Amino acid sequence: SKKTNIPSVLMLIVLGILLQFGLKYFMGGEIDFEQNLRGTLEIIGTVGLIMIVLEAALELELKREKLVPILKSMAIALIGLIGSAWVATLILFEFIDGMTMQSAWLYATPLSILSSAIIIPSVSGLREDKKEFHIYESTFSDIMGIMMFYFLTGGLDPETDAGAIGFAGNIVLTIVIAIVASYALVLIFQKIKSQAKQFLLIAVLLLLYAIGKKMHLSSLIIILVFGLVIANVRLFFPGKTAIFLEQEKMNQIYHELHIITLETAFVVRTFFFVIFGITIVLASLLSLNVAMVSILIIASIYIIRFLMLRIFIGKDILPQIFIAPRGLITILLFYAIPVEAEIEGFESGILLFVIIATSLIMTWAMIRDKNKMGTMLDEIDEELLARNLAEDALREKNVPTEQHKLTEEVAEKHPRNFIDELEEAKKSGKNPESSEKSEPEEETDFGISNDKK
């Protein structure tokens, strides 16, 4: 993936498709992989989502100078999410038979969420500020997209729907629980002396996520807040509260948790996209309606993204404008659409088309940016080489000139003895001017110079 700039996720999906053909060939007959593997896909996807958000949170440093980039990334993620979902809703409502406006919002929301599972591993080669922007933006997009999706599903049941005020209260309650739980986990786990405590910590986080889901809370906020507390522990324990911290143990917990999270996220992400590739129905891509709807949605994604980046960032928006892939969250939320909101006319090929197309566009942009950077570096090397050669040539040209000026100065000072001194200097290898500044005559014990003697 690093050599070709093709996202590893895309390669894993292709591997899954190849495995699908292989399994059908050896097992014979038609197998409904989507129905058989759907439960497995949801479980692996949920664990993968938790690990990816935790991984992103552990890499975020909360500093005063980073406040503006964080808020800017959050604004772009939120406006881009709502704008893309609104346009996609109109497209689906117009072109999908039997689609209601409420169901259209539910189907459009997963298609409007950036995939941190694809973006975070793919932007490692970008400039540091652009890399941080994509990590912030994709993480916020994941969290806010999930919150928006479950807010919309809550509206399907008027009895349980609490409205916008209830939704805001839900978020505040989630943040309070997340902060309290994070402080408690930090204080407890730094006291545990056992070496095998990292997977216990992850198990506790999974439990908190499950409890949050049962309470209809935005559980990913709990994971995000915990990761931020661990990564910025000194910020959350300021002044005298730092006495409750064992800094050495906290550094060890952070380092070990970061490694385990990275490796677990990698393994889970790998299995998820391979299994997704196995469940794909390629025949759905051949539909003209699927292609038309998908292209319209993709075009709307990049138009809205262009406008957002131009407003908030300015002209330096390459390759950011093209880094907007859909992936793990899109698939998970698609499978989470309630039965009462499902529309038979919606084909899953739209989902696949958008995921593959946005990943390919990102691949093209990353390769183009890499080649551009390589060309710029080559130009800088050539410019430095040309400058060095010019300086060497100028230095060689200036050496005789300086010697000539020095000779003229000596000749002006001593016009009579100049020729003799010059010849003597050439024989001895000294500078003509140095002959002028000869050592003072040594005196004998009687105060008479040797010459006078």
Image (tube, grey):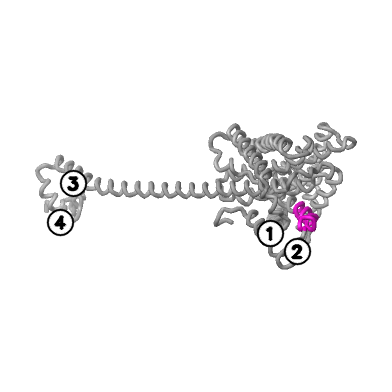
Residue 453 vertical placement versus 146 (above, below): below
User: Which of the marked residues, 3 or 4, is nearer the chain's N terminus?
Assistant: 4
What amino acid does circle 2 point to?
Answer: Gly
44 is within the stretch colored magenta: yes
Q: Nearer the viewer, residue 191 or 316?
A: 316
Q: Using the rendered image of the protein, determine whether residue 248 is visible from the camera's viewpoint.
A: no
At x 85%, y 48%, the residue is 211
- State whether the magenta stretch is mostly helix, strand or loop: helix
Q: Nearer the viewer, residue 154 or 143?
A: 154
Pointer 1 local density, CA inside 10 Å: few below 14, some 14–19, many at least 20: many
Quarter the N terminus occupies: bottom right
Q: Secondary structure at mark 3?
A: helix
User: Which of the marked residues, 4 or 1, is nearer the chain's N terminus?
Assistant: 1
Q: Which residue is mark 2?
A: 29
Q: Which residue is mark 3?
A: 436
What amino acid does circle 3 point to?
Answer: Glu
Marking on residue 16: 1
Q: Which residues are magenta?
A: 32-47
Q: Position of residue 387 (x, y in %)?
A: 35, 46
Q: Which residue is mark 4?
A: 427
